[in-house]
Image: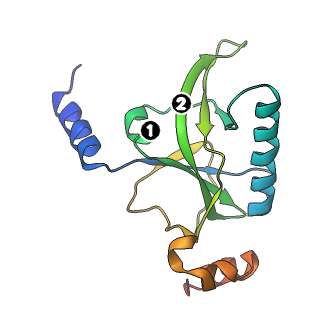
Amino acid sequence: MPRPWLDVAHLWVLKQGMALNLVKLCVGADSIQDLRDWVAERALSAIAAGLEPHSVHTTRMVPKRVDELLAEGSLYWVIKGQVMARQKLLGIETFTGGDGIGRCHLVLGPEVIETLPQPRRPFQGWRYLTPEDAPADLGSLGEDVMALPEDLRRELAELGLL
């Protein structure tokens, strides 16, 4: 059943420049450096194959709000129970796997941007994350905060001091 009010709301969000984001657990990474190493490895593999240095993350659930996500949206990574970093979403490519199940590739920019740590409970898959709920980039807080070790930033955030 068509819902024209939804289309109008969707267009309003796009005109306002409000990008929607995704948040996902970064399984297997214990630190931002682990994530950076994974991204660098994927970028080098892509360059060696003559491709752009993007990393790709495959997920089974295909987002429905693609236009909003690609309007400057990011994938925020949860590392050890806290949102710690993000990568720019460059594209979302849907496909059907060999098992007949629909999936998508989240095409991510090569830069891993550290964010203010934000506690997040475990969940499966990904979730939408509005700009209002997304943590600020760590660089926007100044050089002093950036210079703190990751473990200390994490602990300060848990105490509500960052």
Q: Estimate the x, y position of residue 109 in percent, counting from the top left.
A: 61, 44
- The residue drawn where x is 83% and y is 30% is 48
Instruction: Tell me which amino acid carries mark 2.
Output: Ile
- Left/right of residue 146 with respect to residue 70 in the rendered view: right
Q: Earlier in the sequence, mark 1 or mark 2?
A: 1
- The residue drawn where x is 17% and y is 28% is 4
Instruction: Give the residue at mark 1.
Output: 70
Q: Estimate the x, y position of residue 40 in percent, counting from the top left.
A: 78, 47
Q: Residue 144 appears in which quarter of the rendering? A: bottom right
Specify the label residue 47 is tagged with: none
Residue 102 lies, with reference to residue 90, above or below; the image says above
Screen quadrant of the N terminus: top left
Is the residue marked by circle 2 packed among few (<14), some (14-19), or many (20+) residues within 10 Å? many
Scheme of image coloration? rainbow
Residue 141 lies, with reference to residue 126, above or below; the image says below
Q: Secondary structure at mark 2?
A: strand
- The residue drawn where x is 60% and y is 81% is 143
Q: Are marks 1 and 2 in contact (CB under 8 Å)?
A: yes
- How much space separates mark 1 and mark 2, taking CA atoms? 8 Å
Instruction: Tell me which amino acid carries mark 1.
Output: Leu
Q: Residue 100 appears in which quarter of the rendering? A: top right
Instruction: Give the residue at mark 2.
Output: 92
Is residue 158 visible in the rendered structure shown here? no
Q: Secondary structure at mark 1?
A: loop
Is the residue marked by circle 1 packed among few (<14), some (14-19), or many (20+) residues within 10 Å? some
